[in-house]
């Protein structure tokens, strides 16, 4: 009996000791779990499905992601939006502030997919994986169009060999830099490659070329094609590389996500939706003018073929019809069948998501198009009624028509924060709008609508106002 009692006590002690070890192990596992925010599965497709969100790291550019007339857009954004819908999850976009850090951000789990018109070359594949290519394009030289018959006076390059001893600005971490280094060897001469910082993306450099601040930069042809629609003075006709594959970047520890994306892309690229998205961004604008550029030259006092309709519709909302005419001139050259960037259509170049709200569709008659456009302008006008000076308010209306009122209100907040006048355009809100393309400004907490290539909108306002003043002198 005594021996049984000893055995029982021994078993009891072992049981308690084992239980303590098990509890300790569970406790330690729980603590370790808290230290590790993500396990392997969380970084792959399983984690995306678990949290119900696909996070995309995107460049603020016309090919990747941007906001235009208040609408989220971008060639890569629209593709990934379709992919997220197929997965049954939300799509979240995080703007890459510094291109030097984009692969690090991806590998640090700040996003799931990298979308930045990324050429699939050998060097980046050491750090990240790529999806199958969904686009092919080549690199081209970006320069200003010649203004004289003697192109040599304008330093115009017609052949890559002419880049010898010329200064070309590119981001050092880009494939453009590598291409220029190789090109030096091919032409047997020096190209003065000027390095820019990673937060200065290719579209910012294109803008600097257009403004005359630098002479040359390099871009993919698809990016150049988009920007030719915004900057009429740039030339992108000189190729400097063969075609390169463009793909999405992924972490190497997300093989299931890559497999799923590749399979989906293979099928998606055969669908009409993909063909439509490509046409939407990379086909040239169809704007066959329906009248002579200076319409009034043949009809004294008239500014357009639709003056009577413009006057009647604008009067209903107390909007100057000549301002509306100036907008139409710059949007479509008075062509009711015009098709523009991002799917914009008609006289007023309504975006597909905006036009129907005002009863305007691609097939709508001229009067309906003008009525919808005037109503839209009147709606914007109401948002800026605190600007008493109507001529001043017109500039805010035009900026909002071009870029969306969210960006303009952000510029007002930035102006006020920096001691400028939020109700004055020139050197105040207009200045802040231009700065919305810089990280220092669009990362400010008061900014809610994100980054913007503000120079385009600023130039749009300037051009429309000039046309408006011209129309006022012609039709008093």
Image (cartoon, rainbow, N blue to C red):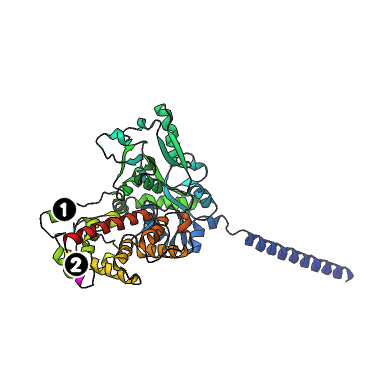
Q: Residue at x 33, y 64 (%)?
A: 396
> From this viewpoint, is residue 71 visible?
no
For the residues labelled 2 and 1, the Cα–Cα distance comes to: 24 Å
The residue nearer to you, when weighing 149 against 128, is: 149
Q: Is residue 92 magenta?
A: no
Give the residue pinned by disc 2.
368
Badge 2: residue crowd in 10 Å (few <14, some 14–19, many ≥20): some
* Residue at the farthest right position: 2
State the residue in front, 424 or 52. Answer: 424
Name the chief secondary structure element in magenta.
Answer: loop
Kindly state the secondary structure of the residue where label 2 is placed. Answer: helix
Question: What is the magenta range?
Answer: 314-321
Residue 294, numbered label: 1
Q: From the viewer's side, name the closer residue of 171 and 7.
A: 171
**Magenta stretch containing residue 316, yes or no?**
yes
Quarter of the image with the C terminus is: bottom left
* Position of 475 relative to 218 (above/below): below
Where does residue 207 sit, x and y in percent of width and height?
37, 48
Q: Residue furthest top?
A: 188
Q: Residues within 10 Å of mark 1 (few under 14, many from 20)?
A: few
Task: Tell me which residue sits at (89%, 70%) in the image.
Answer: 2
Res 330 quadrant in image = bottom left
**Residue 197 position within the rendered picture, expressed as x and y whole percent measured from the top left:** 48, 45
Q: Is residue 219 left or right of residue 20?
A: left
Across and down, in percent, residue 336 comes to: 18, 59
């Amino acid at each position: 009996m005594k021996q049984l009692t000893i055995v029982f006590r021994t078993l009891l002690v072992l049981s308690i000791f084992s239980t303590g070890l098990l509890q300790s192990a569970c406790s330690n596992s729980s603590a370790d779990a808290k230290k590790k925010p993500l396990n392997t599965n969380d970084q792959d497709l399983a984690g995306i499905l678990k949290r119900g969100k696909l996070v995309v790291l995107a460049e603020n550019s016309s090919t990747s992601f941007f906001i235009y007339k208040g609408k989220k857009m971008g060639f890569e954004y629209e593709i990934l939006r379709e992919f997220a819908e197929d997965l049954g999850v939300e799509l979240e976009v995080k703007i890459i502030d510094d291109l030097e850090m984009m692969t690090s951000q991806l590998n640090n789990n700040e996003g799931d997919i990298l979308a930045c018109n990324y050429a699939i070359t050998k060097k980046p594949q050491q750090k990240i994986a790529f999806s199958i290519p969904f686009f092919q394009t080549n690199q081209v030289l970006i320069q200003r169009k010649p203004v004289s018959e003697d192109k040599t006076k304008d330093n115009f390059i017609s052949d890559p060999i002419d880049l010898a001893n010329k200064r070309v600005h590119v981001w050092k971490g880009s494939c453009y830099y590598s291409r220029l280094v190789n090109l030096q060897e091919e032409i047997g001469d020096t190209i003065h490659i000027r390095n820019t910082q990673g937060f200065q993306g290719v579209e910012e450099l294109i803008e600097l070329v257009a403004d005359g601040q630098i002479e040359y930069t390099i871009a993919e042809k698809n990016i150049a094609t988009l920007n030719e629609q915004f900057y009429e003075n740039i030339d992108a006709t000189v190729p400097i590389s063969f075609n390169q594959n463009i793909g999405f970047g992924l972490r190497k520890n997300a093989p299931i996500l890559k497999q799923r994306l590749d399979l989906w892309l293979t099928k998606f690229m055969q669908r009409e939706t993909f063909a439509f998205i490509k046409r939407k961004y990379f086909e040239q604008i169809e704007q066959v003018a329906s009248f002579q550029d200076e319409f009034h030259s043949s009809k004294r006092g008239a500014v357009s073929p639709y003056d009577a309709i413009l006057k009647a519709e604008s009067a209903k909302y107390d909007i100057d019809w000549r301002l509306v005419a100036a907008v139409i001139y710059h949007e479509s050259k008075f062509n009711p069948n015009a098709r523009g960037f991002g799917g914009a259509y008609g006289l007023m170049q309504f975006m597909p998501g905006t036009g129907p709200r005002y009863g305007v569709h691609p097939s709508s008659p001229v009067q309906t198009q003008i009525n919808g456009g005037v109503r839209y302008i009147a709606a914007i006008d109401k948002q800026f009624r605190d600007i008493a000076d109507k001529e001043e308010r017109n500039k805010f209306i035009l900026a909002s028509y071009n870029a969306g009122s969210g960006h303009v209100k952000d510029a007002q907040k930035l102006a006020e924060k920096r001691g400028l006048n939020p109700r004055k355009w020139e050197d105040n809100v207009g200045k802040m709008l231009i700065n919305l393309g810089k990280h220092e400004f669009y990362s400010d907490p008061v900014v809610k609508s994100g980054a913007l290539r503000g120079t385009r909108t600023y130039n749009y306002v300037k051009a429309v106002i000039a046309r408006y003043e011209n129309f006022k002198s012609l039709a008093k």
